[in-house]
Image (cartoon, grey):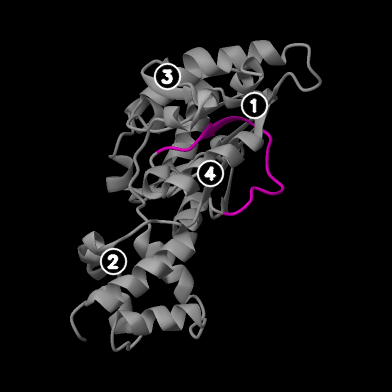
Amino acid sequence: MANLDSKDIDAVCGLVDDLCGICWDDSKAYLIESRLEDLVKEQGCENYQDLVRKVRAELVPGLKEQVIDAVTTNETLWFRDSSPFEAMKNKLLPELIDNKAGSVFPRRLRIWSAACSTGQEVYSIAMTLAQTLPDYKDWDIQVLGTDISPAAVEHAREGVYDHLEIGRGMDQEHLQKHFVKQGDTWKVSDDLRSMCSFHQRNLHEQFTCIGPFDIIFCRNVAIYFGDQERISLFERLAEVLTADGWIIVGSSESLASMGERWHPEQHCRASCYHPNMAAKDFV
């Protein structure tokens, strides 16, 4: 196979942008080779442009999904950056529950993990809910996890993790309470799984037939988007958020440059936004 050249890079970057909305450029040549070289060889392609051609022409069933799985970053761990879960437990949930008192559905909660990878964030949210609400089994709770990677979504849906995956952030208390040992793996308990569902979704597409959500976790994914795509994403997230709902972003992310609607609030060191409440305040 020929070495990666500028035409290969341009072709792959264009494909990755079209498939995932991820902005790669010639500085990502090392990623292109490390993530896609095996696929190029497996498909008998002469070069990376040939792989792109096969994907765009849909000549090989499932090849597009293989490319998406290869280029997306599924880096995650349990209770990643613990501050959002502390904020949810100590600020967001109590406030939401108070606001729901006397409403038509006072015991209904909807939460979305918008880039859930292999499911650790979703199940961490569910464990936080179980810890915060002792009678959570009597609530109408749904935690939705979505990701663009088909393989990641399937892994999350199965809810089975090996020793290395469990070792990344899981504490013994949660492990013993919410997981079942199966040989060399751990499976999420049925009680926890019953709160959670998983679907493949591209965040660049319209969010039809979902929501409204009380809390949306969208952490460490928009950093890979271009400026306009990033603005579009959060505006569309706000559209499927309840009037007093919250959006939580990554610790290094800020939406302040997007306007007054996106004034950040710090709760338990987590970056939280109240865009629909803010929109009313600034009218």
| Image quadrant where residue 96 sits | top right
Which tag, 1 or 3, sits closer to the chain's start? 3
Which tag, 2 or 1, sits closer to the chain's start? 2
| Image quadrant where residue 134 sits | top right
Residue at image mark 4 = 233
- Mark 1–mark 4 CB contact (< 8 Å): no
Residue for point 78% across, 16% down: 103
Residue for point 37% across, 22% down: 83
Local packing at callout 3 (Cα closer than 10 Å; few below 14, some 14-19, many 20+) is some
Which one is closest to the eye, mark 2 or mark 1?
2
Q: Amino acid at mark 3?
A: Glu
- Mark 1–mark 3 CB contact (< 8 Å): no
Predominant secondary structure in magenta?
Answer: loop
Q: Is residue 100 among the parts visible in the rendering?
A: yes
- Tell me the magenta residue range: 205-219
Viewed as shown, does residue 166 lie left or right of 19? left
Give the Cα distance between marks 2 and 1: 42 Å
Give the Cα distance between marks 1 and 3: 21 Å
Viewed as shown, does residue 238 lie left or right of 41? right
Up-down relation of residue 283 to residue 9 (above or below): above
Viewed as shown, does residue 196 lie left or right of 70? right
Residue at image mark 2 = 35
Give the Cα distance between marks 3 and 2: 35 Å
Mark 3 falls on what kind of element?
helix
Q: Amino acid at mark 4?
A: Leu
- Mark 4–mark 2 CB contact (< 8 Å): no
Which tag, 4 or 2, sits closer to the chain's start? 2
Give the Cα distance between marks 4 and 2: 26 Å
Residue at image mark 3 = 86
Give the Cα distance between marks 4 and 3: 25 Å
Residue at image mark 1 = 137
